[in-house]
Image (cartoon, grey):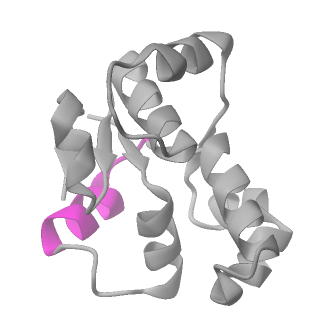
């Protein structure tokens, strides 16, 4: 099954961070279709600009190149994704998480994330 990387997992992958579980690392390495959302580019660049991700300035300068360097696939945000994100019955207010949840649900992919908040709305998740 195809995968969608949460923003923190994408950054951890690029850094070789061991916080990614062994199961998730194996799946990312093996899977042919690993997606990184346009919402992740938005989140990285926004948080880097605000000083919340000082270690991601190089990635923020060219997120598309970072995605391509790993042979990951970009996932654009569509009208259907936006409508689903806005209509999710979910108290979680983070717009980036709402978009990733909507994309995972609509695209039928597993979200790779350590964030348990996605379990509240039954997003298929690899921790």
Residue 100 visible here: yes
**Is 88 situated above or below 91?**
above
* Figure quadrant of the C terminus: bottom left
For image coordinates 57% across by 57% down, the residue present is 71
Q: Is residue 90 above or below residue 33?
A: above
> Where are the magenta residues, as a range?
22-33
Of residues 109 and 120, the one drawn nearer to the viewer in this rendering: 120
Give x and y (percent) for residue 102: 44, 25
Q: Quadrant of residue 54?
A: bottom right
Q: Determine whether, in the image, residue 41 is placed left or right of residue 75.
A: right
Residue drawn at (66%, 28%) of the image = 77
**Residue 61 part of the magenta-drawn span:** no
Q: Position of residue 89 (x, y in %)?
A: 33, 19
The image shows residue 68 at horizontal and vertical percentages of: 68, 58
Where the N terminus falls, by quadrant?
Answer: top left
Q: Is residue 29 magenta?
A: yes
Q: Is residue 36 visible?
A: no
């Amino acid at each position: 099954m195809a995968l969608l990387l949460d923003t923190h997992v994408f950054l951890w992958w690029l850094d070789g961070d061991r916080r990614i579980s062994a199961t998730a690392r194996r799946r990312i390495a093996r899977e042919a279709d690993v997606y990184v959302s346009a919402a992740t580019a938005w989140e990285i660049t926004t948080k880097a600009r605000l000083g919340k991700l000082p270690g991601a300035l190089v990635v923020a300068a060219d997120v598309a190149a970072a995605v391509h360097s790993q042979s990951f696939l970009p996932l654009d945000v569509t009208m259907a994704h936006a409508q689903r994100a806005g209509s999710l019955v979910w108290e979680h207010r983070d717009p980036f998480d709402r978009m990733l949840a909507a994309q995972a649900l609509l695209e039928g992919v597993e979200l790779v994330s350590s964030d348990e908040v996605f379990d509240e709305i039954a997003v298929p998740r690899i921790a």
